[in-house]
Amino acid sequence: MMKRVGVIGGGQLAWMMAAGARKLGLQLLVQTPNPTDPAVAIASATVFAPVDDATATAKLASQCDVITFENEFVDLPALSQIAAARFYPTLDSLKPLLDKLDQRQFLQRIGVPTPRFLAVEGEDGEFRHTVLQFGLPAVLKARRHGYDGQGTFILQHPESDLPKAAPNQWLLEEFIPFECELAVMAARSIDGEVVIYPTVETQQEQQVCRRVYVTAFAPAITAQVEAIARRILDALNYVGVIGIEFFLDRDGNVLVNELAPRTHNSGHYSLDACVTSQFEQQLRAVCGLSLGSPQLISTGAVMVNLLGYETSSSDYAEKRQRLSQFPQAHVYWYGKTSRPGRKLGHVTVLLNDNQDRMEAEAIAQAIEQHWYGSPQVG
Ligand code: ADP
């Protein structure tokens, strides 16, 4: 059996694999640039290097049975030169996923609904002409290295400022006036077994995820989500956990926004609310184990991200202590220094039979009021 798992990336997603690794008797070896990165503390060994340093990954590979990813900003062509390494998900299955344009083309090819899109190059007046021809409102996204809205620009008016800086390779897509945003985590094993977690609602502000509601959806919606998840996993011959983000439009149809070939913020609730967390599931899948149950062990859950609101080295111990006293709350703190907008931790609250969606919203509001010291507009 595979025992030593290499993880490319040492942020909170790798850090949260620790409990699953312990349970399964696995060692985690991590490639990450900084000694202060969250997963360094739980790794049995660390290769200190940027995530796209394939020479460092070759070193990691020499100490591991399998390598997986918590960050997809890797150098795929260089990784494919490491003959002795086994990667799950495989490099072939990652190929259409690392660039937002490739993702859209892949989804279109396999018949999955996705926003109308166009590839554009960022140069001078022609660029503006192309954008206006496409139609507004539109969304312009850097094809690679975007996260938490970095590299995403919503264009509302013809006189909107277009980004001038590099990178000049963009994905232009229609703005979807969505009813809400959904997400789902799914996993596929080496044998092709698929499990799908509950469909959740995610709420973003300034393109950053603020909260996730794990409460029941109409079967007509979850059926679409689950069929899409299966189609994507099978088309990629995927091994591991994948996060899929959706828009739900006003007619009740879902469109895929984005695929994350790894564990995902929208699945953090699974640490406390599911039989098998997304982190344990990823380890099970990439080590060739049978998959665990994705079922909820509570009626539902609400997850709130704790975002930085100031530059500080405080660990906010008192605030966290108070949050952990909320009924059924589980507080996670990633141990990072605080900067505005940075994901520093999260809180998951399990819901019981008597707590509906309204109640879940009130809980999220109370957590945010406590964390930020002021009510947050939802
Ligand atoms: P990132 O890779 O930075 O997470 P996303 O593509 O997921 O970027 O976009 C972040 C957020 O921006 C989405 O969750 C959504 O709220 C908004 N957004 C992105 N694309 C669109 C779109 N085509 N129409 C409407 N809103 C969008």
Image (cartoon, rainbow, N blue to C red):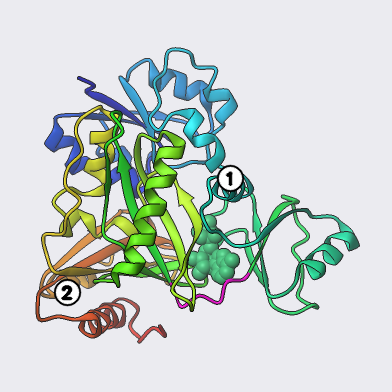
- Viewer-nearest residue: 245 or 121: 245
The Cα atoms of the two marked residues, 1 and 2, are separated by: 49 Å
Residues tagged 1 and 2 counted as in contact (Cβ below 8 A): no
Residue 103 shown left or right of residue 219 in the figure = right
What residue is pinned by disc 1?
109
Residue 19 shown left or right of residue 338 in the figure = left
Magenta run includes residue 176? yes
Is 121 situated above or below 175? above
Q: What is the three-letter code of the residue carrying label 1?
A: Arg
Is 20 situated above or below 220? above
Foreground mark, 1 or 2, reads 1
Res 213 quadrant in image = bottom left
Residue 144 shown left or right of residue 377 in the figure = right
Q: Position of residue 345 (x, y in %)?
A: 31, 61
Q: Quadrant of the C terminus?
A: bottom left
Magenta run includes residue 303? no
- At horizontal 72% and vertical 74% (from top left) the residue drawn is 136
Res 131 quadrant in image = bottom right
* Secondary structure beneath label 2: helix
Q: What is the three-letter code of the residue carrying label 2?
A: Arg
What residue is pinned by disc 2?
322
Q: Main secondary structure of the magenta part?
A: loop
Residue 298 shown left or right of residue 63 in the figure = left
Evaluate whether residue 344 shows in this view.
no
Label 2 neighbour load within 10 Å: few <14, some 14-19, many 20+: few
Is 284 situated above or below 143? above
Res 176 quadrant in image = bottom right
Evaluate whether residue 154 shows in this view.
yes
- At horizontal 27% and vertical 82% (from top left) the residue drawn is 361
Q: Which residues are magenta?
A: 175-180
- Which image quadrant shows ligand 1? bottom right
- At horizontal 23% and vertical 35% (from top left) the residue drawn is 284
